Amino acid sequence: MKTADPFSLPRRRFVQGLALGATGLGLGLTPAQLLARQGHTGAPTLSGDTFHLTLGGADVNITGKTRPATTINGIVPGPTLRWREGDTVTLKVTNLLPETSSIHWHGLLLPFEMDGVPGLSFDGIKPGETFTYRFPVKQSGTYWYHSHSGFQEQTGLYGSIIIDPKTPEPHPVDRDQVIVLSDWSDEDPNHIFATLKKLSHYYNFNERTVFDTLRDFRDKGVIQTLKDRHMWNTMRMSDRDLADVTGYTYTYLMNGQSPNGNWTCQFNPGERIRLRFINASAMTFFDIRIPGLDMTVIEMDGQPVNPVPFHEVRLGVAETLDVIVEPKADQAYTLFAQSIDRSGYARGTLTPNPAMKAAVPEMDPPPLLGHTEMGMGAMNHSQMDHGRMDHSMAGMDHSEHANTVPFAVDSNNPDLPPRDNATDHADSEYGPGVDMRAMAPGEMLADPGIGLRDRDWKVLTYADLETAGGPPDSLHPEREIVLHLTGNMSRYMWSFNGIPFADSVPLELYHNERVRITLVNDTMMTHPIHLHGLWSDLEVGDGKLLRKHTITVKPGEKLSYLVRADTLGRWAYHCHLLYHMDAGMFREVRVVKAKADGDHSHHGAHGEDA
């Protein structure tokens, strides 16, 4: 609905550090209906079932420069919203920005019209308008929300959601703390994207030097070094392409504070503390550890898992992880989250005394991409024929021919060509938008990933996890959809199956069917893949499922998950790296009614049944 007030921008304010503080609390709030309290983050927690959120702009100073940010109720990150499972929440969102905006409730099950994706769910919230979201809360756990319009998320439009369960909490704690990780740049994100399109490795200051080549000559010999360089050059790739956007322009934040800000949480020794990690960054994978303190995971992506103790974890963009820590000593601990490319870190402190701090670990050296990331398995590269690497079937797992689940085929959809196996490459993957195809992608759920494989402590992987209580749904799919994650790094083109979103047609799922989605990562980058509105039950082996909303796929990896298409409508499905999504790694998924019971032989015209 439209407000009667004319469009106006909020007054510009200068803010030191992160948050714009409690001055934003008054924007659009109804104190009689809301409980607001100042948390450790400087951002308030709003509880209840009715919320008023105002999207606006303000100046912030995070790096020493005053730069414009996008705010929610005047703050960055936005307020933490605390709901209760079983309630129906109403959120009135007023847009005071000079452009269309939106809020997407990441990982929540809701009617698609409430999902907050302009062009699919609704038209977006135009300047000066108020849109009312209203939906029942069907789940509990840790989630987050963010803009799905342009690059607003990169400039601050995100916040956390905590949903308390209807039943007693199975893991009672003495202290409950949200930890939002994010990346901030003083650059205009439109400029970042334009720069990546012109020179994709512009932000990568870890590229090879002449000294690296001289070292390789010494260590590997001249011939092998030249062979390796020819291989990488043929693919137009670099073994240093770990992240598109790096610490060169990013400052990594913990609860909105830079490393120098040292966000701090005070505790009493002996307390059980729940830490709710949320990776709300636009482009950054974080490797998280707390030196000297064990963590035990209890939830991932808001869903309970069988507890597993560990020491470090790689948290993908848009994923959440709830852990329990029990610091007993009267000492401080550093929360350390370094970026996957080791170009920077977010940092905070758990301490019994604000005057006490702990040492901050040195960042690890940047790892190098290798044959595993190239989708070549453990092959001896001296035996490879690099001229045929795109087409060779050597090393593939032909056992999948025995898979009795039929591949989804649709002559009207280039994403669904006839296939002999999931690792075969469709014709669409041989265009200019694809510069690499994995020849032997592997099952890597137990692999902690590049840079974490040589740890002498426990690194949590997907293979360690299982949804508590056993499989939440059937293990038996009716159809299988195969999507290859593809791209051309040098041109900064990203896609599924070599087809960017602009040239794609929607993928259709039948209402209530169980579908297996198999992803094959043909690129050298790690991608967090998010399907809106429906659960993704990752198959972790031995009949175990891990229920998630976002699934990280490592370079050279093949994995599968099951989806119950139980909610009709139009859903977004995309890589959650913001600039990859904008560059084309995006699909619309439509859940439609089947023509008739048991008739799965063909689909209707796109969208006519949704």
Image (cartoon, rainbow, N blue to C red):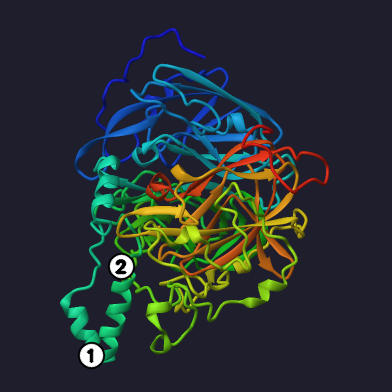
Answer left or right for 304 relative to 71.
right
* Image height of 585 relative to 452, above or below: above
Foreground residue among 355 and 448:
448
Image location of residue 265, percent across then percent down: 44, 49
Q: Circles 1 and 2: CB distance less than 8 Å?
A: no
Foreground residue among 128 and 389:
389
Q: Amino acid at mark 1?
A: Val
At 28% from the left and 40% from the top, the residue drawn is: 190
Image location of residue 509, percent across then percent down: 67, 45
The numbered mark, 1 or 2, whose residue comes first in the sequence reads: 1
Rate crowding at label 2 as few (under 14), some (14 to 19) or many (20 or more) other CA atoms within 10 Å.
some
Camera sees residue 315: no
* Image height of 251 relative to 372, above or below: above
Answer left or right for 171 relative to 360.
right
In whole angstroms, how far apart are the C-alphas of marks 1 and 2? Answer: 21 Å
Specify the label residue 222 is tagged with. Answer: 1
Image location of residue 462, percent across then percent down: 59, 65
At 66% from the left and 32% from the top, the residue drawn is: 608
Q: Which residue is mark 2?
A: 236
Q: Look at the numbered disc 1 and give the secondary structure of its residue.
A: helix
* Image height of 299 relative to 54, above or below: below
Q: Quadrant of the C terminus?
A: top right
Q: Amino acid at mark 2?
A: Arg
Q: Look at the numbered disc 2 and give the secondary structure of its residue.
A: loop
* Image height of 52 relative to 564, above or below: above
